[in-house]
Image (spheres, coloured by chain):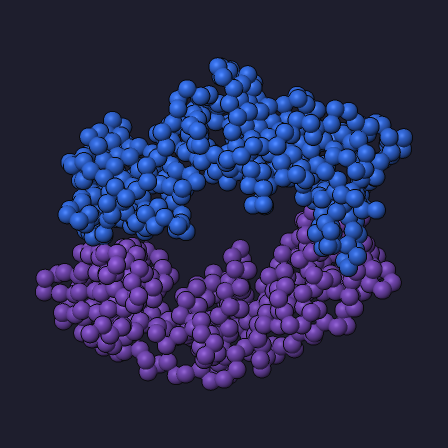
Chain colours: A purple, B blue
Amino acid sequence: MNFSINRVAFIKALNVVQRAISAKTTIPILTGLKIDVTDHEIMLTGSNADISIQTTISTSNPDNELQIQATGSLVLSPARFFAEIVKKLPDRELQVDVADQYQTTIKSGNSEFNINGLDANGYPHLPEIDHEHQIELPAKLLREVISQTVIAVSKQESRPILTGVHFTLEKHLLAVATDSHRLSQREVELESPLTSPADFVIPGDSLKELSRMLDDEEDLIKLSLSENQVLFTFGETQFYSRLLEGNYPDTSRLIPNSSDTKVQFAAGELLAAVERASLLSHESRNNVIKLTIKPADKQVMITGNSPDVGKVEENLEPQALSGNDLEISFNPDYLREALRVFGSVPVEVAFTSALRPFTIKPLERPDEFIQLITPVRTF
Amino acid sequence: MNFSINRVAFIKALNVVQRAISAKTTIPILTGLKIDVTDHEIMLTGSNADISIQTTISTSNPDNELQIQATGSLVLSPARFFAEIVKKLPDRELQVDVADQYQTTIKSGNSEFNINGLDANGYPHLPEIDHEHQIELPAKLLREVISQTVIAVSKQESRPILTGVHFTLEKHLLAVATDSHRLSQREVELESPLTSPADFVIPGDSLKELSRMLDDEEDLIKLSLSENQVLFTFGETQFYSRLLEGNYPDTSRLIPNSSDTKVQFAAGELLAAVERASLLSHESRNNVIKLTIKPADKQVMITGNSPDVGKVEENLEPQALSGNDLEISFNPDYLREALRVFGSVPVEVAFTSALRPFTIKPLERPDEFIQLITPVRTF
């Protein structure tokens, strides 16, 4: 293997695959970066067994200034160390040259590094993907679906299936997450529906990492499936995640069809009041705040309380309210995280009773997105 | 106590004194914020026993929108909690009202917090300062003196006096720090010298915190002394630090008067090469890099080495070199930190022999600033 390349282009690709590489792994070779050089491109691979990322640098893009003198494959470990070297090299270009026994020389300007590489045959193979189950989504929409659902993913390993987001694909894409205290569901109409339905569970952590990578993407993201892996393709990059095994619980029956008390708020204003009230609930052992709703008096009051520290009371100014009087207590952190994904749009909060879950929906397009929070019994 | 105030002005003052307040303290009341309200101003005090910060908010500045209805003193604990409340309040103003038993009501818009305060008589008194020993320094110059010396302060508690910077004041201000592996010394001519000399040792941590507070200051900083405290005054703020007790070692004899090998570099270029070489030394147990200097061949080579990972070699391009051939090994982190405070100016590195300390000075005004690094024996 022997190539020279523009340093900035190489760093950009390294930064992409490094997202998948962890120093803590049970498979030692996965601390490394895999480099495959063929006639016309370099492929970089990083993996932590849950997530694998591949990206290619092609000779066809003149910005890469890529010149390949000899092909080959190699693993450089730890990847972090190799990336630090490349970032600190003095020149605009760098040259990588691999000799016997994977002895690797990296030259740039007056600087010459000699480091030990590893045989790439020891690196795990990435899964084969079935390109039959395949959809395309705009990057912005996929980011939105992820941000709206990962908040409700469980952090407990006691029911592993709940640490993922459940996707159902047919005419629509339906994404649901619940940690059994709250639930978040987003629906998206697909422009080209699948010929046969598919359903699968992607780990929340994979989706968070994917979402960070999509920050600057504006194009369509391709989603393809295999039996136990999902592949997202965008630009020069392929992002693989394992799927969670097992059956996701049926969540459709959890969402109430009717309500007895409804209140409309600007999401941002309710959020600010919840954050104030939670300052006190966080100082108390049970972390609960209370909403007191009196539609006849046009009154909604939020209360937070800590026996040691003090209390806070605030009269809210809802945009509309109707239905029965209600006092309901709940964990403010669930409502805070739910409201944050709404931004500043108007929302409707709909209650059934003090011990039944309540829902939060955007006033416009309420069928697209619903969040559900289970209250806490305080009496 | 009863006052109303502009929230932004209050937050600004809170942020200043909070720098001194730590949640971890052996004196419980120091987790709190002390508020003293007199006829025309509010004084806020925070302290962690090592550092104390006081700042005043005056009715005379209309931006403060300060209206005092009743005077008094109070401690609110924990300070962090009170500050979070104030930051999250909804309105432009807030009102603080203290009733019996230090019950404190904070109102803003529709939001009303009730929290428990503490008797201010339980709060320690700040030291009395002798305003006889007093100098003034421009904020920018003081920041420079601090940044140039704190890098050499010892992190070991085995010799506590070395965890501070030693100041000697008379015609000049001389600031010296050493951790016994390296030394940094800065000299500043004083515009109005002291009538009697003074010397004292300020903890490095206090200076770092002070320096962060001076980031936006452009004016003169007043330095005053008491027997065991130093006070820096700027704007509305007073910053107290305890002094370290004990005799600082005589460092003047450590600085060599002559040298046998001299090399001139642009500080930034030498720094970049040292950072590259240290990538490998950091992977090895003894963290040492080597400079090989051959003035006759106009050659300076830097080498870093890790038996497990590999090695790096780089030919440097000094601006000038003279004297004897030399091979010298040292901890690259000391040289890196030393070079960082020089920025991009030209420096002269002067060596005596492979086992004697070497010095780094700015080519211009070499008497003002000197850094000294002890090499490591590798043979």
Report which quarter residue A45 is drawn in: bottom right
Is residue A26 at all visible to an observer of this figure?
A: yes
Report which quarter residue A97 is drawn in: bottom right
Task: Give left or right: position of B54 versus B157.
Answer: left
Q: Position of residue A131 (x, y in %)?
A: 60, 77
Report which quarter residue A281 is drawn in: bottom left
Name above or below for residue B117 compared with residue A13: above
Task: Give left or right: position of B95 versus B151.
Answer: left
Residue at the far front: name it.
B246
Q: Residue at x 27, y 40 (%)?
A: B35
Q: Position of residue B283 (x, y in %)?
A: 72, 55
Q: Residue at x 31, y 78 (%)?
A: A255
Between B201 and B351, the residue placed more toward the observer is B201
Name above or below for residue B37 compared with residue A99: above
Name above or below for residue A181 compared with residue A31: below
Name above or below for residue A205 compared with residue B174: below
